[in-house]
Image (spheres, rainbow, N blue to C red):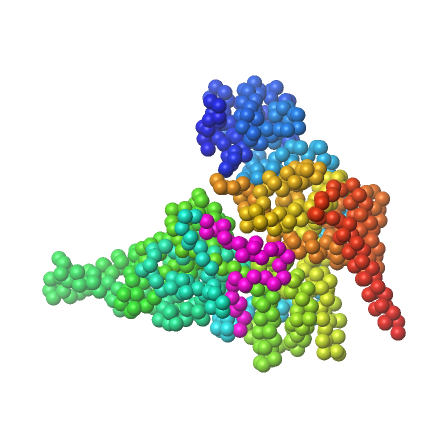
Amino acid sequence: MAEESHEGKYIDYGFGIPRRQMIVEAKRENAYFELPLDKGSRTVSLPSLAKKDGNLDAALRQVGSYCTDRGVPIAVACNGHQIVAFIGSRVDGVPPTHGKAIIFRTPGEMLADFMTLWNCLSYPAIERKYLQSILNQEALPPAPEKISRRLLHFPGVKKRNELEHELRILGEIFLQDLVKDAELEQDFLKECYCSSGALSQYALISKDILRNRYSASGEGKVKTVTAATGKGKAGVSKDLLSAVIAKSVTQRPVILLGDVGVGKTSFIKNLVAVEASEELKRGIVLYVDFGREPALRKDLQEYVLDSFERQLQDKYGLNLRSDSFVRGIYHGDLLAMREGIWGPLRKADPTAYLMKEVEMLAEKLDNKVGHLKRAVEHLISGERRTVVAFLDNIDQRQDDFQEEVFLIAQGLAESWPITCFVTLRPSTYSKSRRQGSLSAYQNRVFTISPPRIDLVVRKRLEYALHKLINGGLLALSSEGISVESNMLREYIEVLIQSMERNPSLAECIDNVSAGNVRDALDLLTSFVGSGHVDTGKILEIKLSRGRYYVPLHEFLRAVIYGDNEFYSPENSFVANMFDITSLDSAEHFLTPFMVDYCLRSSQNPHADKGYIPEEQVFSHLNSLGYHDQQISSALARAEQSKLFDFASADQASPARVRITQRGAYILRKLMPKFVYVDAVVTDTPIVDEGFRELIWDARYIGDRLERARHFAGYLDTCWEDAPRVTGGFSWADGSAELWRDIENVTERLARRASDYGR
């Protein structure tokens, strides 16, 4: 907002909705200031900076007073090519202009150190108070070095033997690549497709959150958001089936709404091949997959139209430039030409008349958009065919890309006689409805919720096993690959039997994937042929005894480490809940406190579909003695690890967070397990020097158990100085469970050693 007034004082620019979060004072002409160009620290003292330039001092005081008067946290003074950013409204007794600032002396500095610029002044950074954290960080001494920093090849790649390597390749084929094979598509959909919308049987968050996953997207005067699935055992809703062929009902694209990985592509393929097969028996289905294309395209509309033309040629044998087809499209134009000024040439000079016809038709062909549109109109009116277009997988791209594709879909639906479907993320849809291209339209929206993850996994495994048992051969024609492996069949049987026998495996996959089918399949694939799993032992026992049941801890090792030798939070599905940024030992429990608070608050009947304002989270953690810097860092890690869903601020509400299944599962199930602490200990700074000498890099199981005991003792000591929350998270409970698990592992190893000795 520019030139906004408060008590008669006008600011240059105010940022933030619904409340202002930053004020920018832009100086020019007689009040112009200039920063010294000498290279120095990015963080500087405001008093030392201001005394060098009277105009700068005045600008800093002016924007600082604006922030203080309005309660706006961030102040920025700018002269067009230099920036001074500081805390403009403080509660620590320090005047705003007596603190510190982040400065950029040239546009070149902004470009070279863009990460700092973004981390301080971007919209998400302002919401998370990163600037305040950076400028106040001197109050909190940094945490000691992590063990991982001392490892030579961190995070490393876990070595696999030949058997494990082969099984990993096969696992990727039968779990990930089957769906891509065109020859298997019909059979695959029939055997493996799972309807969306079924609520998870293993979720550790409330069913209300799962039901309301997309409910906020439909807010408004007119309810336009409905579920894509039908009631009971119906595959898809009747409204959606009607939308497939009811071009006359609306001139708006139909939006299929769902998060990344929930199965929108499978839903579309099943809709076309199974649910709407009768309606589309004489139909033409045009499908554009933006997930497989280059990240940047200069002309998206041209790409879409080229794809349409190519599919009409390859799939339906329609050469849009053949003489007979072109003359059929423009039959009316040719008749009109006969009656025009060139008509007499038809008899007087047939060759000249033919040339005029060709010239006219060539001009039509040169207009690619117009010609393709006329071709589609001809197919619909002349051949009585239904044309449906799907623009899919744009949800994997940035918001502006998604909006541009939506506008293309809008143009097609509005001026072409086709039904156009476009897939969007809920966050993009909600944001665009408020302030983007969607705000101008009233679209029909169908939500695609995740299927039951346990059913997806089971059907994938059973399908691959069926192919192997009946044919002995699993072939992927499009890849030119044929697979024949008795070991693969045995391994799949192990997984199927284990999933049936051990519900904790399904619970793990369901919650860690949090409804994302892609993540669920990645989790399963990570186990197949993992270097952290004794694959040879599993197959040996299966072949000798006829069965092997995978225990949860064995599966978790593959999930937590992935392909790395050491645990790395950047490459893992599992977050380190004990990580810290300062020497404050109580910070080890900040993330557990935060996750627990959001979990409990989401169950409050007054919660907004499970969402909690970020400022409420800050307030709660501040009351426990944690600093904004610590909280901001914890929130950033939580976002990276998908412990929370984040909703940006808008005119109706502030920035909000909501617990995910993954966050609840790690808090409730993983934290007190040996396999978890054994992994994250190398990523956790140890504040106490005495314990730091005892907690080292360990490779053998006996040494790792001893290290886990020291780590558990260290956390118990840290808990003595940590805050307490009545009815909330308590490490005392987790500690007791962890100690039991460590001793259980120790006893299992002792029994195994005893059996081996016999």
Does the stretch in magenta take in 607?
no
Which quadrant, please, contains the C terminus? bottom right
Residue at 84%, 64% (x, y): give it.
Answer: 747
Q: Tell me which corner region of the image, top left, top right, bottom left or bottom right, holds residue 253.
A: bottom left
Does the stretch in magenta take in 212?
yes
Residue at 30%, 56% (x, y): give it.
Answer: 370
303 to 31, vertically: above or below: below
Residue at 82%, 53% (x, y): give it.
Answer: 709
Residue at 34%, 66% (x, y): give it.
Answer: 386
In the rendered image, residue 519, in percent from the top left (x then y), is placed at 60, 60
Seen from the viewer's position, the closer of residues 666 and 375 is 666
In the rendered image, residue 609, in percent from the top left (x then y), is placed at 55, 50
Magenta span of residues: 191-219
In the rendered image, residue 472, in percent from the top left (x then y), is placed at 60, 80
How many numbered callouts? 0
Side of 38 relative to 558 (left or right) = left
Viewer can see residue 369? no
Q: Main secondary structure of the magenta part?
A: loop
Q: Tell me which corner region of the image, top left, top right, bottom left or bottom right, holds residue 719.
A: top right
Viewer can see residue 216? yes
In the rendered image, residue 29, in percent from the top left (x then y), is placed at 46, 21
